[in-house]
Amino acid sequence: MRFSIRAILALTFLVALAMLAWRSRMELQKAEATREVLEAEIDTMEASLRTDEPELHRLILTAEDEAASFQKLRAKVEQAFPLLREKYSEITPPEEDNTFAMRGLPTLPLDEPRGHAPVEFRFLVPEGRPVWLKFGVHQADSSSSYMSNPDEKVVTLTESPFQDTGPFEMQLPPGDRILSIQVGFAENDELPLRVTYGDQVLLDTKAVTKDISSSSFSNISATKQFNVPPQQKLPWLMGAKVDLPPSGSGAAGSNPSSELGFTFWLSDEPSGFDAFPGK
Amino acid sequence: MAKKKKRSLLKILGWTLFAGLCVAIGGYVVHLSTLQRAQKEQNASLQARNDELKSVVDQIEQLDAEANRAKMLASRFLNLCRTVEDIPDFDTPYVLSRQQGYEHDAMYIPAGSHTLRIFTRWQPDPKNQEPNADPDSSDPKGELSWDVPLVPDSGYFFKVDVERRGGPVKWTLTSNNDQFETRSETLPLKNYSNSGASWSSSGEVNLPNQLKQFSRAGVTAALTTPPPVKLMDATLRGRLDEQWYEIKFLVELISEGGARVSVREAQRLQTLGKADLLLPYQGNGTYELKQIGPDL
């Protein structure tokens, strides 16, 4: 059978029409699927908001009053804290010459709601005495021997998940300044660490490794001023432990230990470390 | 002649079929597009509803997060208070308390009428007996309890005083409000040497008489006896003369009025069908349960 042009055109038209019908059906199915998803989401949310019960729904909306109470509580804390901090940060210059004085300051995690409160110390560095601030990253172990003799006991690493591993040191200039150590919240495979001394940023770094989880730390308890006369050793300040995932990271060396630590301490003489990198 | 007729018949049939198919499929397409348009309209209004609900859900989640932050900051702030004068006038409906070690409990008591109940119990330490201990010995054991009415809207420090090397066991309650007279009591134990202590605190930001047990029994009990807020629960261990002893301190706040619940908890009660137990809403984001006489 020979097909005329008219027949071929007619057939083509029919096929096109059929394809249009097919596509329309697909789109309708898609719209229906969207409807089902939306309805399911709405059902879930309405269930949690209990819109089926006007009484309950009204109750839920009074949550705003509760929120206002808590906002007020927070505002009171923010208002009262500076006064408390001022009261407990007073420091008096020691009478004896070349005596170092320090005091731990009360802190709150006002800027870092999920992170730790910063660890802060106020230092009075005397004119005639060298005071070195040191920082090192090291393999953490359970002993706290570094607290008594960090210069000897802290075995610093030069490579670690920290972007700036150090070790670092700095001679503190004479005067009255605040050292602030802020360990951030571990998330997105990062743990931030920021250190300032007075107006100067000493360290603004982070440890980057998969599944890094938060750290724990301890610091010298210096709730009252204490003085360190020239013949006495300057103290350890703070130590932290960072939990790394069990698989470990190559940067921490071939050591299977999955705990990393970092320590801040003061010393009478330099160790030949690099200077703090700053920002 | 017959062949020509047959061919034209076929032709007519063919074109009729063609026309028929066109109409059928065309009609189907029109039908589908009508349905689709209707569905799209419905989806649009569903999406609007979905967005509206989502913004309320997100808002509530954010309120929860902010509430938790406020509670955390209040608790940490109380931990920094070293004297009762450091506690500011929070002007909040919540009872704030923070245990600082086993000895100190810093508290803020809100408006209303509140009584502090201090309960102590002392006995030979059951876990730490001397090998030849006589279980029927007449070693002193006993309990004592005190109810101290408090001045509202004030800060308090509850302190336990013990010695490491033998001395009395004493507690002291001070306030930053002049209207409250410092109260101090000594336990009838002489020469107690403290070695250590363990303690727990039941959450540091509470409503007065906050309801915590939502079981049927818990709710029913709360209607007759509103549950006090536990502020301190510490157990001291040490030696009384030659014997190992433990001394328990339990400090609770009993407030006037019924059990209280937060908005979230009021929702729970509503869901459990117990909304009739709630008094009308008075504001502040808290609800109070009715109080039923014990004879009911």
Image (cartoon, rainbow, N blue to C red):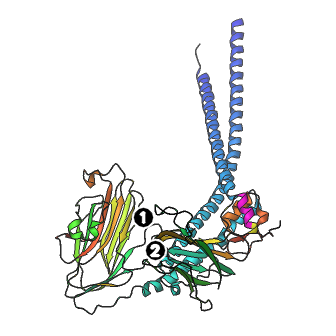
Q: Chain of mark 1?
A: A
- Quadrant for the C terminus of chain B, please: bottom right
Above-or-below relation of A201 to B153: above
Q: Position of residue A12 (x, y in %)?
A: 59, 27
Q: Disc number at residue B194?
A: 2
Question: Which residues fall within the magenta stretch?
Answer: B214-222
Is disc 2 in the same subunit as disc 1?
Answer: no
Q: Disc number at residue A185?
A: 1
Q: Position of residue B254 (x, y in %)?
A: 67, 75
Answer whether residue B36 is magenta in the image: no
Residue B251 in sight here: no
Q: Amino acid at mark 1?
A: Phe
How many other residues sit within 10 Å of disc 2, few (<14), some (14-19) or many (≥20)?
many
How many other residues sit within 10 Å of disc 1, few (<14), some (14-19) or many (≥20)?
some
Q: Residue furthest right?
A: B296
Residue B131 in sight here: yes
For the residues labelled 2 and 1, the Cα–Cα distance comes to 39 Å
- Quadrant for the N terminus of chain B, please: top right
Q: Nearer the viewer, mark 2 or mark 1?
A: 2
Q: Position of residue B38 (x, y in %)?
A: 71, 46
Q: Position of residue B80 (x, y in %)?
A: 47, 79
Q: Are marks 2 and 1 in contact (CB under 8 Å)?
A: no
